[in-house]
Protein backbone atom coordinates (compact mmCIF):
# COMPACT_ATOMS: atom_id res chain seq x y z
CA UNK A 1 0.00 0.00 0.00
CA UNK A 2 1.29 3.46 -0.93
CA UNK A 3 0.74 6.59 1.10
CA UNK A 4 0.11 9.62 -0.99
CA UNK A 5 1.51 12.81 0.52
CA UNK A 6 -0.60 15.80 -0.40
CA UNK A 7 0.85 19.24 0.28
CA UNK A 8 -1.10 21.39 2.71
CA UNK A 9 -3.23 24.06 1.17
CA UNK A 10 -2.17 27.66 1.81
CA UNK A 11 -4.92 28.37 4.34
CA UNK A 12 -4.04 25.33 6.46
CA UNK A 13 -0.34 26.22 6.44
CA UNK A 14 -1.06 29.85 7.38
CA UNK A 15 -3.20 28.68 10.31
CA UNK A 16 -0.37 26.43 11.49
CA UNK A 17 2.15 29.30 11.28
CA UNK A 18 -0.24 31.58 13.17
CA UNK A 19 -0.71 28.97 15.91
CA UNK A 20 3.07 28.48 16.25
CA UNK A 21 3.60 32.24 16.54
CA UNK A 22 0.91 32.68 19.19
CA UNK A 23 2.26 29.79 21.25
CA UNK A 24 5.57 31.65 21.53
CA UNK A 25 3.95 34.84 22.91
CA UNK A 26 3.99 35.33 26.66
CA UNK A 27 0.58 35.56 28.22
CA UNK A 28 0.34 38.29 30.78
CA UNK A 29 -3.29 37.68 31.58
CA UNK A 30 -5.01 34.98 33.51
CA UNK A 31 -5.11 31.23 33.10
CA UNK A 32 -7.41 31.63 30.10
CA UNK A 33 -4.44 32.55 27.90
CA UNK A 34 -5.69 36.00 26.99
CA UNK A 35 -3.08 38.57 26.03
CA UNK A 36 -3.04 41.47 28.44
CA UNK A 37 -0.32 44.06 28.65
CA UNK A 38 0.51 46.77 26.19
CA UNK A 39 -0.26 46.99 22.50
CA UNK A 40 0.35 49.52 19.76
CA UNK A 41 -2.52 50.73 17.59
CA UNK A 42 -1.92 51.30 13.88
CA UNK A 43 -1.64 55.00 13.03
CA UNK A 44 -1.70 57.06 9.82
CA UNK A 45 -0.13 60.54 9.81
CA UNK A 46 -1.23 62.72 6.90
CA UNK A 47 -0.15 66.25 6.05
CA UNK A 48 -2.35 68.56 4.04
CA UNK A 49 -1.84 72.19 3.10
CA UNK A 50 -3.60 73.51 6.19
CA UNK A 51 -3.56 70.59 8.67
CA UNK A 52 -1.78 67.52 9.92
CA UNK A 53 -4.08 64.59 10.73
CA UNK A 54 -3.34 61.59 12.88
CA UNK A 55 -5.75 58.67 12.56
CA UNK A 56 -5.40 55.80 15.04
CA UNK A 57 -7.29 52.51 14.87
CA UNK A 58 -8.69 51.82 18.33
CA UNK A 59 -11.25 49.02 17.92
CA UNK A 60 -12.99 48.13 21.15
CA UNK A 61 -11.67 51.21 22.98
CA UNK A 62 -14.17 53.61 24.50
CA UNK A 63 -13.55 57.33 23.86
CA UNK A 64 -13.51 58.00 27.61
CA UNK A 65 -10.56 55.58 27.93
CA UNK A 66 -8.37 57.70 25.60
CA UNK A 67 -6.21 60.60 26.78
CA UNK A 68 -4.43 63.05 24.48
CA UNK A 69 -1.78 65.47 25.71
CA UNK A 70 0.66 67.95 24.21
CA UNK A 71 3.83 68.72 26.13
CA UNK A 72 7.13 70.19 24.92
CA UNK A 73 6.15 69.73 21.28
CA UNK A 74 5.19 66.05 21.69
CA UNK A 75 1.61 64.86 21.19
CA UNK A 76 0.86 61.71 23.15
CA UNK A 77 -2.16 59.45 22.68
CA UNK A 78 -2.59 56.88 25.41
CA UNK A 79 -5.37 54.79 26.81
CA UNK A 80 -6.68 51.44 27.83
CA UNK A 81 -8.56 48.64 26.10
CA UNK A 82 -10.45 46.68 28.74
CA UNK A 83 -11.12 42.99 28.39
CA UNK A 84 -14.82 42.32 28.14
CA UNK A 85 -16.03 39.41 30.23
CA UNK A 86 -16.85 36.73 27.70
CA UNK A 87 -19.86 34.53 28.06
CA UNK A 88 -18.89 31.40 29.95
CA UNK A 89 -18.91 28.42 27.65
CA UNK A 90 -17.98 24.82 28.13
CA UNK A 91 -14.74 25.15 26.18
CA UNK A 92 -12.72 28.08 24.92
CA UNK A 93 -10.85 27.30 21.71
CA UNK A 94 -8.80 30.44 21.37
CA UNK A 95 -8.27 33.94 22.75
CA UNK A 96 -6.35 36.12 20.29
CA UNK A 97 -7.48 39.69 20.93
CA UNK A 98 -5.12 41.87 22.93
CA UNK A 99 -6.07 44.12 25.82
CA UNK A 100 -4.28 46.55 28.06
CA UNK A 101 -2.68 49.94 27.81
CA UNK A 102 -1.32 51.67 24.73
CA UNK A 103 0.67 54.81 24.04
CA UNK A 104 1.85 56.54 20.87
CA UNK A 105 3.84 59.80 20.76
CA UNK A 106 4.52 62.17 17.86
CA UNK A 107 6.74 65.23 17.57
CA UNK A 108 4.53 68.11 16.49
CA UNK A 109 6.01 70.57 13.97
CA UNK A 110 6.25 74.21 15.00
CA UNK A 111 3.87 75.04 12.15
CA UNK A 112 0.95 73.57 14.15
CA UNK A 113 -1.38 75.86 16.09
CA UNK A 114 -1.44 74.01 19.43
CA UNK A 115 -4.48 75.94 20.70
CA UNK A 116 -6.67 74.65 17.88
CA UNK A 117 -5.92 70.91 18.03
CA UNK A 118 -9.14 68.86 17.95
CA UNK A 119 -9.93 65.16 18.31
CA UNK A 120 -12.88 63.06 17.20
CA UNK A 121 -13.80 59.40 17.55
CA UNK A 122 -15.90 57.49 15.05
CA UNK A 123 -16.28 53.78 14.26
CA UNK A 124 -13.22 52.82 16.31
CA UNK A 125 -10.96 55.40 14.68
CA UNK A 126 -9.55 58.35 16.63
CA UNK A 127 -8.74 61.33 14.41
CA UNK A 128 -6.60 64.14 15.81
CA UNK A 129 -6.57 67.26 13.63
CA UNK A 130 -3.67 69.67 14.06
CA UNK A 131 -4.31 72.91 12.15
CA UNK A 132 -1.30 74.82 10.89
CA UNK A 133 -0.72 78.41 11.92
CA UNK A 134 -1.66 80.94 9.26
CA UNK A 135 1.95 81.81 8.40
CA UNK A 136 2.79 78.14 7.75
CA UNK A 137 0.01 77.60 5.20
CA UNK A 138 1.06 77.80 1.59
CA UNK A 139 -0.25 80.88 -0.16
CA UNK A 140 -0.23 82.30 -3.61
CA UNK A 141 1.68 85.52 -4.19
CA UNK A 142 0.25 87.56 -7.02
CA UNK A 143 2.64 88.96 -9.61
CA UNK A 144 2.04 92.62 -10.24
CA UNK A 145 2.66 94.35 -13.51
CA UNK A 146 3.83 97.94 -13.81
Image (spheres, rainbow, N blue to C red):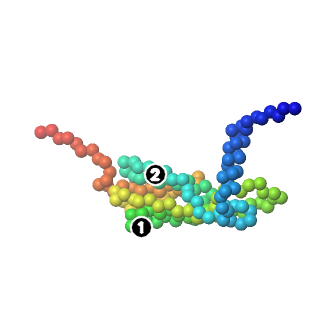
Mark 2–mark 1 Cα distance, whole angstroms, equals 19 Å
Residue 4 position (above or below residue 51): above
Residue 125 seen in the figure: no
Residue 59 lies, in percent from the top left, at 61, 55
Q: Is residue 145 left or right of residue 108?
A: left
Outermost residue toward the left in this view: 146
Residue 65 lies, in percent from the top left, at 58, 65
Residue 46 lies, in percent from the top left, at 44, 49
For marks 2 and 1, the one nearer the N-term is 2
Q: Which residue is mark 1?
A: 71
Nearer to us in this view, 36 or 125: 36
Residue lying at 69% horizontally and 61% vertically, measured from the top left: 34
Outermost residue toward the right in this view: 1
Residue 73 lies, in percent from the top left, at 39, 64
Quarter of the figure that contains the N terminus: top right
Q: Which residue is mark 2?
A: 45
Amino acid sequence: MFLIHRPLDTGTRLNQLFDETLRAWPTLGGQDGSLVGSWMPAVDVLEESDTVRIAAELPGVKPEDVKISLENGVLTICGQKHQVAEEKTERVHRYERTYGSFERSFRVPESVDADKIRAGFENGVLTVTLPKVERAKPRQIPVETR
